[in-house]
Amino acid sequence: MKLASYADGSRDGHLVVVSRDLTQAHFATGIATRLQQVLDDWGFLAPQLEDLAVQLNHGKLRHAFPFDPDKCLAPLPRASGWAVVMADGAVRRDAGQFAGPHQPLRAPAVGEVALAAIAGDLSPASDTAASLDALRLLTLAVDWRLDDELIATQAAPLAVTPDELGTAWRTGRVQARLHALHNGSKQPARDVDAQPGAALARVARLRALRAGQVVGASLGALDLTLTAGDSLHLDLKTAEGSSLFGALDLDIAPLAPTDLS
């Protein structure tokens, strides 16, 4: 299933189920209003959301509406924590506040992309197999840094269960291509081969994880620096060209007149 959090004036947004083709959505109000509720009671609530998703995909929900990514917050705006496992195994931590997929920045930035695994409860020292069992949802995230200081973490609009990834999900690995447009110009696509279970297990070596912890498997830095007035479009897609998590669109605010004086 594919899940998103629509902006409604609250900190966490309102949970919606999104159709497989990303065209339709339906509020999950009768089941849960926030994604964290689902993560806290996954065994009971997730099957109900799956049933809702099946009905939505078959066009059987009378109150479905067109899905609008512009209305999305991050799927889990306030996670239990955010940790990124780097290529060398080092772990970088942050509080877990996620900006939405279209939230602008007000400063130049360098981006570090990660496949983000949203976990259920996970015991300390869990191995990769146990960590995969605790894997609930996946999304795409970018840490934006200025002078090596984290200024924002941005998440794609959708969090999806691994079974929704189709051919991009193979024996615990996500294999896809990262596509980017910088100021409207296509950048070289990047092949992605990430192991979210291994990333979760790496963090679980250090401590137990609570439901709602997000762990990123680093996909490396973006090969560009965004400056004032720039725009960036990022989308992780299958080999067939289907978007896995919806696109992230970032604008860097242009310099104010006072900044130019």
Image: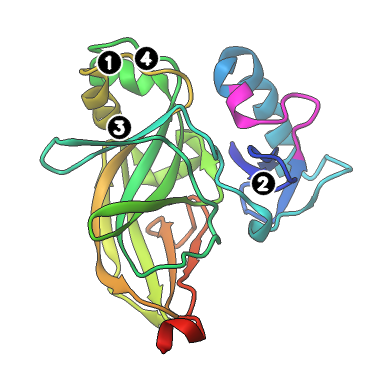
The image quadrant that residue 48 belongs to is top right
In the rendered image of this protein, does residue 230 appear above or below residue 164? below
Magenta residues, as a range? 27-38
The percent position of residue 209, horizontal first and vertical second, equals 37, 18
**Which residue is the site of mark 2?**
19
Q: Secondary structure at mark 4?
A: loop
Is residue 156 shown left or right of residue 236?
A: right
Upstream in sequence: badge 2 or badge 1: 2
* Amino acid at pointer 3: Thr
Q: Residue at x 45, y 35 (%)?
A: 162
Q: Give the residue at x 72% y 26%.
A: 32
Q: Reading the chain from its start, which is encountered first: label 3 or label 4?
A: 4
The answer to the question of whether label 2 and label 1 lie on touching residues, with beta carbons closer than 8 A, is no
Residue at position x 66%, y 31% in the image? 34
* Front-lying residue, 163 or 126: 126
Q: Amino acid at mark 1?
A: Arg
- Name the N-terminal-most of marks 2 and 4: 2
Residue 102 location (% of width, % of height): 55, 61
Residue located beneath label 4 in the image: 122
